[in-house]
Amino acid sequence: MSEYQYYEFAAIDRPLTPTEIAELRAVSTRAVITPSGFVNHYEWGDLKADPADWIRRYFDAFIYTANWCSCRLALRVPLATFRKAELKPFATKYVLTVDANDEHWIFDWALDESEDYDRFAADDGSGWMPRLMPMRDELLHGDLRPLYLGWLAGASGGELREDAQEPEVPPGLSELSPPQQALVEFLEIDPATPRRSVAELRELAESAAAVRLEREAKERSKQEAERGRQRKAHLRQLMAEVDKYWDAIDAQAKRGSASGYTQAVRVLVDLAEGYTLTSSRKEFERALRRFVVRHATRDALLWRLKEAGLWSG
């Protein structure tokens, strides 16, 4: 049997330019080249270019099959689609590699040593692109199941150490989409591999929930710390011009209106916290007492001060 290799590239986000088509044509005189893709097969030769380079420069999807029981899928998505930390747990040494350039993540799934000779003897490669390319849309929507399947293929192929940690299981893994089912077929993932006992699933779910809760708690703590930092910066700025704010509070109180009182009390709450941060609460209370003496006849204002916990007289 002669050698047989099939290459198919697809441009999805933008069509190839005439210049790019000319560059591709210089590599292959008999390939089918259109603004949306490149298709060719080789029985004795090979593609005189690096598919990884073409993915970086031109294309969003790539399919490769060879009759020596090897196949490969690559998909490219914008860099903003994922954070690096999301992707790192899924990468393996060979089956699923994750690369990036300045604008894109590039995911590359590979099967190098299939023993299904009949499959590769009959498969000319042309049917895989329409079945697998829709996974790119799933990735663009944040679906991590295709990456988990790549990790699973690597794990079942012995690529990982015994102590390697399983990535967090993505939602919906028990109900794969048609493109994901095609990936299972493409990589020859053992259908029994992801099955676990009820106890294992429960333990996994509890573990995943614990990890998620811990991550959310850390994120909340980080956000609260940032809000605290911003609050302190605001209070220090306020205290740097404290006399101006006391004058503004006096002016609001003298308006004798409900909205003026409300605004005055709102600033007084900030001042109370600012004094506590930069000097002392007692100093604020002395300044507040002087303010109350000046406005002692304004019952509505005093009531608001008591409601805010600023005054008990």
Image: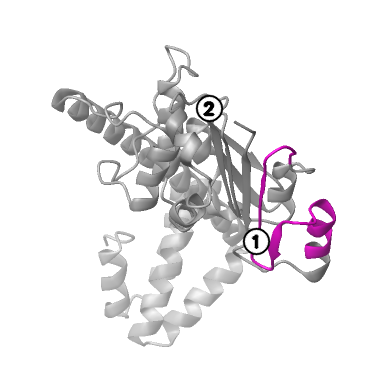
Between residue 12 and residue 112, name the one nearer to us: 112
| Residues in magenta, as a range | 21-46
| Disc 2 element | loop
Residue 305 located left or right of residue 10: left
Location of residue 16 in the rendering, given as x and y in whole percent from the top left corner: 72, 66
Q: Where residue 300 appears, x then y in whole percent?
A: 28, 79
Callout 1 secondary element = strand
x and y, in percent, of residue 254 in the image: 44, 84
Quadrant holding the C terminus: bottom left
Residue occupied by mark 1? 37
Of labels 1 and 2, earlier in sequence is 1
Residue 30 shows in this picture: yes
Q: Is residue 213 left or right of residue 79?
A: left
Nearest the viewer among 103 and 59 is 59
Q: Which mark is residue 92?
A: 2
The quadrant in which the N terminus is found is top right
